[in-house]
Image (cartoon, grey):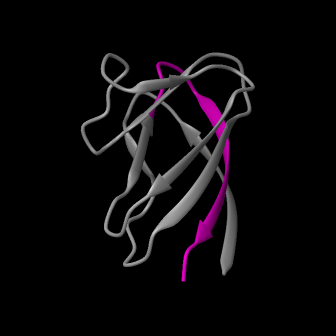
Amino acid sequence: MTIFTNQITLNQTRQEIVSARNQSQRVCIHNDTGGRVYLGNESVTVDNGIHLDASDERNITLNPNESLWGISSASREVSLMIQIME
């Protein structure tokens, strides 16, 4: 089992938060700052993404070859812990 941690700043341009791998991944994402961030696939927007409110945390399992994307209406920092399922 391999675990990575990272912090990413999201803004008005969608960006890949967790890259696709050949293995499943467990992702714990925490919204560190005030305001919402939005999560989804490569087409995520503030209108179609699932939101994560300030100080909220969400656990997501990504299947092989799936990635996680995010966007926000203002600059927001998120923290990640990613476990690679080997």
Residue 16 horizontal/vertical position (percent): 41, 51
Query: Residue 26 lies in what quarter of the image?
Result: bottom right
Residue closest to the eye, 27 or 13? 27
Q: Quadrant of the C terminus?
A: bottom right
Left of 25 or right of it: where is 40? left
Would residue 5 be counted in the magenta stretch?
A: no
Query: Residue 4 lies in what quarter of the image?
Result: bottom right
Residue 18 horizontal/vertical position (percent): 48, 58
Residue at 38% over, 62% down: 63
Residue closest to the eye, 19 or 1? 1
Residue range of the region highlighted in magenta in the rendering: 71-86
Prevailing SS of the magenta stretch: strand
Residue at 28% over, 45% down: 42
Residue closest to the eye, 30 or 11? 30
Residue at 43% over, 76% down: 23
Residue 60 horizontal/vertical position (percent): 53, 47
Would residue 72 be counted in the magenta stretch?
A: yes
